[in-house]
Amino acid sequence: MYYLHAGTIGAAALLAGAALGLLAAAVLVVNNLRDIDSDRRIGKNTLAVRCGVRFTLIEYALLLHAPFALVLVLARTRRTDRAARAARAAAVGAAALSPRAARRRPAPG
């Protein structure tokens, strides 16, 4: 949609799109993590089943933190006051995601 309006695709658009895509992927990963035991019982071979809980938790943590890093990269490419404020907000958001929350396994059912 961006290309239709702007007529070009720049690094800023790609970075912003990637950040949103990573958050969407995190939603899918946490759903697979929640269903890992039932998927294993019925023989469903999701990435979470094949690689295990530890890998899936690490993947989930990376998918949650990577968008904040991309915002910092985006701020460096834009070099404006608005970008600097966004970068500070991203740093605060990343700090709010505690490693303990990423290690916590969701309750079944």
Image (cartoon, rainbow, N blue to C red):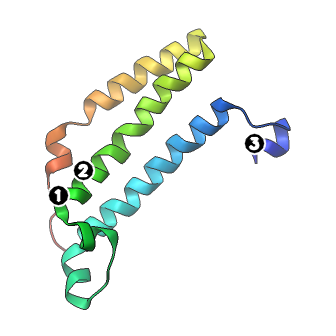
Element at label 3: helix
Q: Are marks 2 and 1 in contact (CB under 8 Å)?
A: yes
Q: Residues within 10 Å of mark 3 (few under 14, many from 20)?
A: few
Question: Looking at the image, is 61 positioned above or below residue 6?
Answer: below
Tell me if 100 is positioned left or right of 6 in this view.
left
Q: Are marks 2 and 3 in contact (CB under 8 Å)?
A: no
Q: Earlier in the sequence, mark 2 or mark 3?
A: 3
Say how many tags the image has. 3
The residue pinned by badge 3 equals: 2
Q: Residues within 10 Å of mark 2 (few under 14, many from 20)?
A: few
Element at label 1: helix
Element at label 2: helix
Tell me if 34 is positioned left or right of 83 in this view.
left
Question: Looking at the image, is 30 positioned above or below residue 78?
Answer: below
The residue pinned by badge 1 equals: 54
Q: Residues within 10 Å of mark 1 (few under 14, many from 20)?
A: few
Tell me if I can see residue 13 in this picture.
yes
Q: Position of residue 48 (x, y in %)?
A: 28, 68
Give the CA distance from mark 1 to mark 3: 37 Å
Tell me if I can see residue 106 in this picture.
no
- Viewer-nearest of discs 2 and 3: 2
Q: Amino acid at mark 2?
A: Ile
Which residue appears at 58% of the width and 37% of the height? Answer: 16
Question: Looking at the image, is 81 positioned above or below residue 106?
Answer: above
Q: Quadrant of the C terminus?
A: bottom left
The residue pinned by badge 2 equals: 58
Which residue appears at 42% of the width and 30% of the height? Answer: 69
Q: Amino acid at mark 3?
A: Tyr
Give the CA distance from mark 2 to mark 1: 6 Å
